Image (cartoon, rainbow, N blue to C red):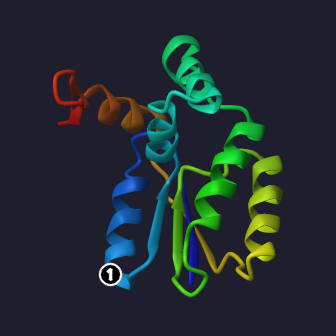
């Protein structure tokens, strides 16, 4: 089983993906978390992602998402089911993800879209805060 969970920021897609990963013993790729982890590395890719996420505060371009996703997919067991949240965000990324999965003998089984209103998303996001000292979300 290979699942994709999509939805607006604050919709709970990460929470739902984690619950499904635990229930069905799936490898979980949280693209936001994965990109933040790479951004901590003192490498050209890490510095570029850091700059995009923390300085320009924009979404990473498809070429970077592809590179990071490729590295992550190639590190996983082919036998284990998979759930991805936070990607793809564009048609181009969708095509790439389908092709990348097919190359490693997988295909998307289901797509789950968590739909909430823009108003609800803003309300949920405004309640988030991070302790800068320990970098933990509350």
The front one of 3 and 47 is 47
Give the residue at x 77% y 65%. Answer: 100
Q: Quadrant of residue 25?
A: bottom left
Q: Secondary structure at mark 1?
A: helix
The front one of 67 and 86 is 67
**Is residue 122 shown above or below 107?**
above
Q: Quadrant for the C terminus, please.
A: top left
Image-based side of 24 in relation to 79, left or right: left
**Is residue 69 shown above or below 3?**
above
Image-based side of 30 in relation to 106, left or right: left
Name of the residue lying farthest toward the top: 55
Give the residue at x 74% y 60%. Answer: 97
The front one of 123 and 13 is 13
**Is residue 69 shown above or below 121?**
below
Name of the residue lying farthest toward the front: 42
Image-based side of 126 in relation to 11, left or right: left
x%, y% of residue 78? 61, 82
x%, y% of residue 22? 32, 75
């Amino acid at each position: 089983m290979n699942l994709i969970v999509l939805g607006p920021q604050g919709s709970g897609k990460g929470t739902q993906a984690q619950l499904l990963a635990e229930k069905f013993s799936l490898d979980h790729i949280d693209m936001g978390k994965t990109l933040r982890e790479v951004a901590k590395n003192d490498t050209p890719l890490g510095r570029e992602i850091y700059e995009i996420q923390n300085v320009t505060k924009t979404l990473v371009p498809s070429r970077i998402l592809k590179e990071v996703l490729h590295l992550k997919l190639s590190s996983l067991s082919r036998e284990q089911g998979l759930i991805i949240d936070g990607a793809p965000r564009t048609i181009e990324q969708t095509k790439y993800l389908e092709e990348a999965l097919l190359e490693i003998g997988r295909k998307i089984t289901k797509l789950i879209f968590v739909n909430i209103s823009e108003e609800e998303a803003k309300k949920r996001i405004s309640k988030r805060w991070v302790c800068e000292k320990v970098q933990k979300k509350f």
